Amino acid sequence: MNPKRKQRLMIVLFIVFGAAIAVGLTMYALNQNINLFYSPTDIAEGKAPESTRIRAGGMVVEGSVKRDTQSLKVEFGMTDYAHSVTVVYNGILPDLFREGQGIVAQGEMNSEGVFEAVEVLAKHDENYMPPEVADALEKAGQMPDQLRKKEAQAQ
């Protein structure tokens, strides 16, 4: 092989390996930042991965909110009316958070099957529900009547 061809081959190999490394690093970064949505039913059925950041949404179970008097720790149940999941959150809850309202929480499942939230988002009015939560409630056959009417009017 003459030196000119050898030089071209080295350049092509360098470009191919460089592109492969760039694609690999990009895929790794995207995989780390993805937040998949799971309903309480999906979590109860074991579809949600453990120790991986996910989003979960549903309705806060009536009478389930327990606040620690010594800290900001709050424990409550989240349901899609088919299954319930216990959520633990350490922080200040949104002003609109209350029992019977829709929420989306971001966090991860621990080994005991408890969802450890790092962020809790509450809906901003009585007619709005995050699309993921609405889909989960619709699958469970528990969509609130006012939302069903609103969706019918939108179509």
Image: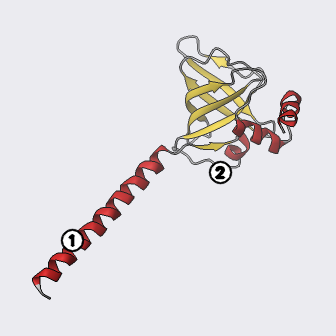
Q: Which three-letter amino acid code belongs to the residue tagged 1?
A: Ile
Q: Nearer the viewer, residue 15 or 123?
A: 15
Q: Residue at x 70, y 29 (%)?
A: 77
Mark 1 crowd level (few <14, some 14–19, many ≥20, 10 Å Cα): few
Left or right? Give the position of 86 relative to 108: right
Give x and y (percent) for residue 47. Answer: 65, 51
Cα distance, mark 1 to mark 2? 46 Å
**Quadrant for the C terminus in the image:** top right
Which residue lies under the disc numbered 2?
A: 47
Determine which residue is flagged by label 1: 11
Q: Is residue 82 left or right of residue 39?
A: right
Looking at this view, name the residue that lies furthest to the left. 3
What kind of residue is marked 2?
Answer: Lys
**Residue at far front of view:** 4
Q: For residue 78, what is the image quadrant?
A: top right
Q: Residue 55 — which label?
A: none
At a point 34% along the width and 57% down the height, the residue shown is: 22
Q: Residue at x 86, y 41 (%)?
A: 141
Residue at left offset 68%, top offset 28%? 103
